[in-house]
């Protein structure tokens, strides 16, 4: 089935006989799932990582057989496969490079037309029906990732089951969100690359303060702290702010132990200038959030001046340390993702990487678990425990320790195996007599072990002992 693009270029959905056939509860659930996927790539400025977050989310949350994203290369003639999840995870196979207009992917990009089907083997445009039948592929959705008339890529997903109308109602919105995020990330990477070419290797030799002073030649510059070499992304963004506010009256560059700040005051901005500044600052704010920083504005002197401050943390050198993040709440997922990036870690979906989580269901098999304690109860079989006050530097240390097989923030059980066994039975509601029968010991022996537990844990009641054992992750 081929559906023409809408007039506003938003991807279409599979038509249904009546919108009343949509299940409201199912639709709300799918919307929540899509929102959490979008949260996972919010603020990300690396196109490949962003695309992978989406394809992983589609496979895991919507049970797709596999999902892929191609991005249009700068020559505008080839689509490059940058993310693939599910049945196929490689990106260098036969469809690793697709010419514009070739195969279904190339036609979707060239014509900006979405293709949706719930009976893929019978579609006349399918080149390999035997493959679709053999792998029981029923559903297919292909969307052009386009902003206006400009196509930046293609999203394609395949399903073993027919695509449900609620999912197809949500998918266009998710496609639009990832398109905007990818466009921003691509623009950022392009500008950073162009800036790097323009300044060559001299940027590491010329102090940032000298470069800002040259850009803001009409402003008085004050520097506080010891100047240090910054990573390219941070250096670039500070200069971008200076170029945006080149009519500044006063400027301060501040270095402290945590990061660097550029504070610029603009005098008497006209309404038109303020609108222009706001437009540029919105883009800088987005880029800053991806680096773990923030941008703030504050009117001064009865609106006669405007103070803008960009604060960015010092970034860790890139490393191969990877961390999967699986949190219950979307806001916690986003916060932990930003924290991981600020720590120089690579957020991923990889069962071989440690996982930072507050979901007990995640603790299975031989996963290396970093438990983020949002409640007093801490599960067993974890390698590390952290709380919401953890800093990027500490998180990096935790991941390094867990990766090397060490523990962090937890202590080994002080209780014997028998004592833990008795406590566990107590939590299940058994009485001393029941425990004795279950373990084939006397009731007095049960009481003896429990008295030892109270003494070791320095508590007065059995309930206090149970609480402490649960909190420590022993039972």
Image (cartoon, rainbow, N blue to C red):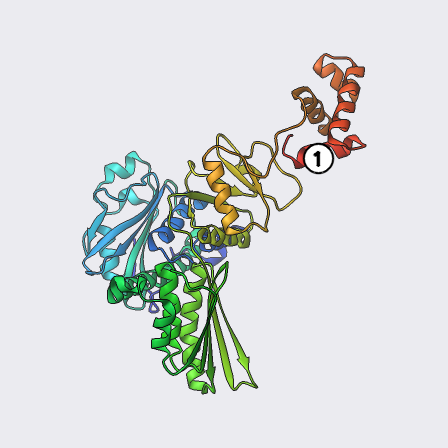
Is there any visible trace of residue 198 in the rendered image? yes
As drawn, 274 above or below 335: below
Which of these two is toward me, 68 or 400? 400
Mark 1 secondary-structure assignment = helix
Give the quadrant of the C terminus.
Answer: top right
Q: In which quarter of the image is residue 183?
A: bottom left
Task: Give the quadrant of residue 411.
Answer: top right
Picture coordinates of residue 213, whole percent (x, y): 37, 75
| Residue 143 percent location from the top left of the image | 32, 56
The residue drawn where x is 36% and y is 75% is 243
- Out of 354 and 130, give the one closest to the viewer: 354
Residue 350, given in percent of the width and then of the height, sits at: 41, 40
Please say whether residue 23 is visible from this viewpoint.
Answer: no
| Image x and y of residue 312, in percent | 46, 62
- Up-down: is 342 above or below 435? below
Residue visible at 45% across and 64% down in the picture: 226
> Where is mark 1, residue-wise?
468
Q: In this view, does 112 lie above or below 49?
A: below
Q: How crowded is mark 1: few (under 14 residues within 10 Å), some or many (20 or more)?
A: some
Which residue is drawn at the image coordinates 30% and 63% (left, top)? Answer: 205
Left or right: residue 460 compared with residue 367: right
């Amino acid at each position: 089935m081929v559906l023409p693009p809408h007039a506003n270029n938003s991807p279409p959905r599979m038509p249904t006989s009546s919108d009343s056939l949509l299940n409201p509860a199912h639709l709300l659930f799918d919307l929540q799932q899509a929102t959490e996927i979008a949260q996972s790539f919010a603020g990300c400025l690396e196109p490949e990582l962003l695309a992978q977050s989406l394809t992983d989310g589609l496979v895991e949350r919507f049970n797709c057989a596999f999902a892929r994203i191609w991005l249009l290369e700068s020559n505008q003639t080839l689509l490059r496969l940058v993310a693939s999840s599910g049945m196929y995870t490689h990106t260098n196979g036969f469809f690793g490079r697709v010419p514009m207009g070739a195969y279904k992917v190339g036609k979707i990009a060239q014509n900006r037309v979405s293709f949706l089907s719930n009976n893929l083997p019978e579609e006349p445009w399918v080149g390999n029906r035997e493959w679709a039948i053999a792998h029981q592929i029923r559903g297919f959705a292909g969307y052009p990732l386009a902003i206006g008339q400009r196509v930046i890529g293609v999203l394609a997903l395949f399903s073993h089951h027919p695509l449900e109308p609620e999912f197809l109602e949500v998918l266009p919105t998710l496609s639009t969100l990832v398109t905007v995020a990818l466009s921003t990330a691509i623009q950022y990477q392009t500008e950073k690359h162009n800036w790097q070419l323009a300044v060559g290797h001299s940027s590491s030799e010329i102090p940032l303060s000298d470069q800002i002073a040259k850009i803001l030649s009409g402003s008085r510059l004050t520097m506080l702290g010891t100047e240090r070499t910054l990573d390219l992304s941070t250096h670039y963004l500070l200069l971008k702010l200076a170029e945006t506010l080149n009519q500044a009256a006063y400027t301060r560059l501040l270095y402290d132990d945590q990061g660097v700040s550029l504070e610029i005051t603009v005098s008497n901005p006209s309404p038109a200038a303020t609108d222009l500044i706001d437009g540029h600052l919105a883009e800088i704010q987005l880029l800053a959030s991806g680096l773990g920083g923030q941008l703030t504005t504050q009117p001064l002197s009865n609106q006669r001046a405007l103070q803008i401050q960009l604060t960015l943390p010092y970034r860790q050198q890139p490393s191969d340390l990877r961390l999967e993040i699986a949190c219950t709440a979307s806001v916690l997922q986003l916060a932990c993702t930003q924290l991981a990036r600020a720590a120089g870690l690579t957020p991923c979906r990889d069962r071989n990487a440690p996982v930072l989580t507050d979901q007990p269901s995640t603790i299975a098999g031989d996963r290396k678990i970093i438990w983020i304690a949002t409640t007093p109860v801490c599960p067993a079989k974890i390698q590390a425990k952290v709380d919401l006050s953890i800093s990027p530097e500490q998180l990096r240390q935790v991941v390094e320790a867990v990766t090397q097989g060490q523990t962090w923030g937890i202590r080994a059980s002080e209780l014997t195996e028998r004592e833990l066994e008795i406590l566990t039975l107590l939590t299940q509601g058994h009485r001393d007599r029941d425990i004795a029968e279950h373990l084939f010991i006397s009731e007095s022996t049960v009481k003896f072990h429990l008295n030892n537990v109270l003494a070791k844990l320095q508590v007065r009641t059995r309930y206090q002992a149970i609480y402490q054992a649960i909190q420590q992750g022993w039972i």
